[in-house]
Amino acid sequence: MRLHTLPVSTAGVVVASGYAYAHGGFRWVPALLCFLFAVLAQIVSNFANEYYDYVRGSDKKGREGFRRGVTEGDISPKAMKTATFATLALACAVGCGLIPFGGWKLVPIGAVIAVFALAYSAGPYPLSRLGLGDLAVLVFFGIVPVSLTYWLQTQELTADVVCASVAVGLLGTNVLIVNNYRDMEDDREAGKRTTVVLFGRKVASVAYLLFGLASIGLTVPVWFHNYNFAAPVIYLALHLLTWTRIRRSRGAALNPLLGATARNMLIFSLLLLAGCLFL
């Protein structure tokens, strides 16, 4: 499940619910269902990544990253495949619970989300091998969950929410950047053309820094309301500290920094939530 990275999916729902509260439209039932759906969708993506990377031979034993259960023989390929599609079915069931709040138009939207939860690793053209993983994270862990969660609660979409959705997506992309930064040599050998493989670690490092700074810029109205300067300073301090350590690290030393990046994303979402509560 890769629990240390689940803030990537939860942050969007937390932020969207904060904006919904600030705009007088918070509804706890659709917010909770969106939260469960988002977590399950990320777990599906993680399970699929474990299984399909094993099938393609992209993972190898003793890798620098976190231990892969299927590759190391802890979990059978059949069990992982079964878990992937069982969790996908559960996510779809939870998603159907949102139909009373958003109508039947949610069915095709949910289907697209389900497909892309698998498409990162599965299919004839997996996004992770084509340098499109970062874009997929930006859209499906940022723009989509924030915008959809907010719309399901308020039945509208505002410019500040769209900006916040991009901010969350950029922070989610940073988690993937650290993962691919660590695995660059292994990914190149396995034929995975991630953005780090394509452009190198220096460009990835600069992107990581800029994405964190941009996330603050995109949410300025919240931070500057009532002169709430402490919150963005706290986040930026954590972001810069993690970025500095990433630049100096290689291999397994990047594993805790992957978790730190997800932690920073969680802290950002909670600080933004707190700011929204006082708008």
Image (spheres, rainbow, N blue to C red):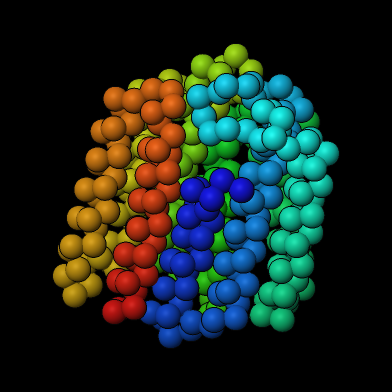
Image spot of residue 166 (x, y percent): 45, 54
When asked about the image quadrant of residue 119, the answer is top right
When asked about the image quadrant of residue 239, the answer is top left
Q: Residue at the location (18% across, 62% down)?
A: 230
Q: Residue at the location (23% across, 72% down)?
A: 225
Instruction: Quarter of the image for the C terminus: give it.
Output: bottom left
Q: Residue at the location (71% across, 68% down)?
A: 95
Residue lying at the far top of the rendered structure: 189
Q: Is residue 174 visible?
A: no
When asked about the image quadrant of residue 122, the answer is top right
Image spot of residue 197 (x, y percent): 51, 21
Residue 8 relative to residue 107: left or right:
left
Residue lying at the far bottom of the rendered structure: 24
Relative depth, front residue between 31 and 161: 31
Q: Residue at the location (49% across, 82% down)?
A: 26
Q: Is residue 1 visible?
A: yes
Relative depth, front residue between 106 and 70: 70
Image spot of residue 121 (x, y percent): 69, 36
The image shows a total of numbered marks equal to 0
Q: Is residue 184 above or below residue 43?
A: above
Image spot of residue 189 (x, y percent): 60, 14
